[in-house]
Amino acid sequence: MNVHIRFSPAEQAAFLQAEIDGEYPDARGRFGPYGGRYVPETLIPALERLTRGIREYLYRDDFQIELIDQLKTWVGRPTALSFAPQLSAAWGANIWFKREDLAHTGAHKINNAIGQVLLAKRLGAKRIVAETGAGQHGVATAAACARLGFPCVVYMGAIDMERQAPNVGRMKLMGAEVIPVIGGDQTLRAAIDEALRDWVSDPGETFYVIGSAVGPHPYPWLVRELQSIIGREARAQFIAQQGQLPHAVMACVGGGSNAIGMFHAFISDKSVQIIGVEAGGRSPALGQNAASLSYGWPGVLQGCYSLLLQDVNGQIQETESISAGLDYPGVGPEHALLMAAGRVHYESATDADSLVALQECARLEGILPALETAHALVGAKQWAQTHKDHHIIVCMSGRGDKDMQTLQRSLIDPLSATPGS
């Protein structure tokens, strides 16, 4: 069922202009009709304290100096902008990668984790809790906590722990306590529920590091601000190398952190197409994908009003995706707004197509992308067919080492481009 809110052209134009002018989120934490704060009363003081902390510290010179130093000397920023010559020749357009897979811990998640843990330090927190799906946010948070001297607890669904076992080991080596979540769907949604319960029990001394652009205000705003370095770097790098803007930018979308990080710097560039690619799973049928923007309708999940995968009675449905990091039944409210405003086009890619695109990238470029990123590669491949010689930047959100167990199970032959059953 798909019951998106319908907006007039005038409303769409107003949303887009407010987004370009920096008016979102508003004082209520809304991105147009989406966003907000739907949480137990016990969490309101913690959220208010966090909101004040963002305004007080995030943009201060001393905080930015410390953050930029960590990003430069520890995370390894700026990450490279790499041309992909073999894929470009095979697909027909000029494919560029923004190499977040080269950042410390192997994905874009570290940009947000180190920023939030630095903020937690300023706010006087004593311990950090986090959730993780594919494990990359958990690894990034564990690393940031080790770097800054915080105890760290990471909640992870039991299913995700099995399919992302290497990342579980990495978190533990860096001193984090990884707690398996055996209730609910045993994936990212259940892990977020448990992390929220932990935070509710001690909102004064515990800081919850959310890994994606979801949840109650101010998290979608905070995550966007910390991840927007991706798009700012990519935009400046492309202009420096090519003397122009790209024709398009693309990223995979689960909750939406790497995507909003890539997209935000380009929203006011009307000549640049912006495209997000969700997890199409096995089919468009409810319960067989994780494409909330493509197939969802409005509702509230885990503190935020956005587009969700739910049945006619408003019951959130389980999702399905080969990618643990995209396996979530909702999406960040800013993405819902950008679709409503007509600025970003969202589509989906199936598991099978993503496996093929992943292997093509590995064989032709010597880069093994994360399964999450492989969905964006499907979108880039399709876009290239009708945009010969145009330039597109794909956010290489993470590397695929973590997915080897899944790949070995999902392919008949790891050296073959034929997906398994």
Image (spheres, rainbow, N blue to C red):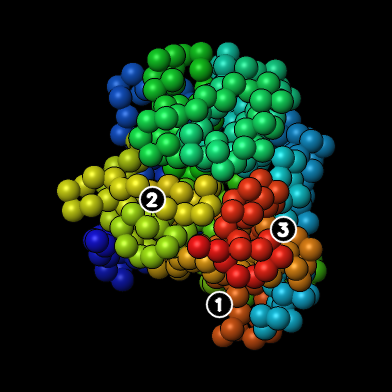
Nearest the eye: 147 or 131: 131
Tag 2 or tag 3, which sits nearer the N-term? 2
Which amino acid lies under the numbered mark 2 shown in the image of this protein? Thr
Where residue 332 sits in the image (x, y, percent)?
43, 48
The residue where tag 2 is placed is 319
Q: What is the CA distance from the residue labelled 1 to the residue labelled 2?
A: 24 Å
The numbered mark at residue 368 is 3
Tag 2 or tag 1, which sits nearer the N-term? 2
Count all numbered tags in the image, as a single digit: 3
In the drawing, does residue 235 fall left or right of residue 257?
A: right
Residue shown at 66% from the left, 46% from the top: 402
Quadrant location of the N terminus in the rendered image: bottom left
Where residue 212 sits in the image (x, y, percent)?
51, 42
Q: What is the CA distance from the residue labelled 3 to the residue labelled 2?
A: 25 Å
Q: Quadrant of residue 125?
A: top right
Residue 4, relative to residue 175: is it above or below? below
| Residue, far right | 73
Residue shown at 67% from the left, 83% from the top: 92
The residue where tag 1 is placed is 382
Which amino acid lies under the numbered mark 3 shown in the image of this protein? Leu
